[in-house]
Amino acid sequence: MGPISVALQPQRVVDDDGATVEVFALPSDGANLEELLRDLFENHWREITFGPIIQGAAWELRATQAPEKIKMFDGYLTVTFGAPHFHICIGEHKGSHNNPVSPELARHRRTSRVELYRRLSQSGTPICWGLRLFNGKGEQQITILLPNPFLHPETDKILKAPDWSRLSLWDRLRARWLGLTEPDPFDRSGRGFRHE
């Protein structure tokens, strides 16, 4: 599959915490989402941190092994790392024959918004890169934090100098999903990381 028809210029939004975020909208259909999530969890599981990040809670999980299984069933993608696993509704969801789900509940559960994003510092430069999915009521389902050039890959301690090679997954996702094959110099304009 080639790049999908999406807006190539980011939309600037302000998150609930007041942070400015640049958002690149991606398609939310099940086939594209399955391809994207399979790629991230099968090929980049060592590099990513994932979980919901909502007001009052940030689940920053890392896999200690490759997934044993990734499968689709009734609209849910299940990623299994041995006993730990998660389910996320990305496709058509009907429920069982004996316990069907109402169309309204199915719309609520299913991913309706997908975005690559970069969070900006107070000085206006990128400090965090990721992917996030939201359900039909705008509730966050998952955030996948991509490697950050300002943080050590194993300890998350702030590096003295940025390691711009850690933006390679971000650049790869921009190329695949947005057709933007050249790295964006703006991504490499920041001077450091701090929680803001």
Image (cartoon, rainbow, N blue to C red):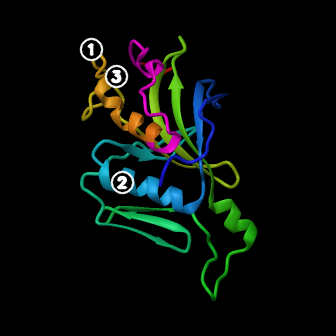
Residue 183, by quadrant, is: top left
Tell me the element at label 3.
loop
Predominant secondary structure, magenta span: loop
Q: Which mark is residue 41?
A: 2
Q: How many residues crowd around disc 1 within 10 Å: few (fewer than 14), some, or many (20 or more)? A: few
- Tell me the kind of residue under disc 3: Phe
Tell me the element at label 1.
loop
- Say which residue appears at 75% left-offset and 66% top-offset: 104
Of residue 24 and residue 137, the one placed in the foreground of this image is 24
Eyeballing the image, is 195 above or below 171?
above
- Say which residue appears at 60% left-offset and 30% top-offset: 10
Q: How many residues crowd around disc 3 within 10 Å: few (fewer than 14), some, or many (20 or more)? A: many
Span of residues in magenta: 176-193
- Tell me the kind of residue under disc 1: Lys
Q: Residue furthest front?
A: 2
Of residue 93 and residue 17, the one placed in the foreground of this image is 93
- Say which residue appears at 61% left-offset and 45% top-offset: 5
Q: Which residue is mark 1?
A: 160
Confirm whether residue 89 shows in the render. no
Residue 181 is covered by the magenta coloring: yes
- The disc, 3 or 2, on the residue closer to the chain's N-terminal end is 2
Eyeballing the image, is 187 above or below 15?
above
Residue 79 location (% of width, % of height): 39, 62
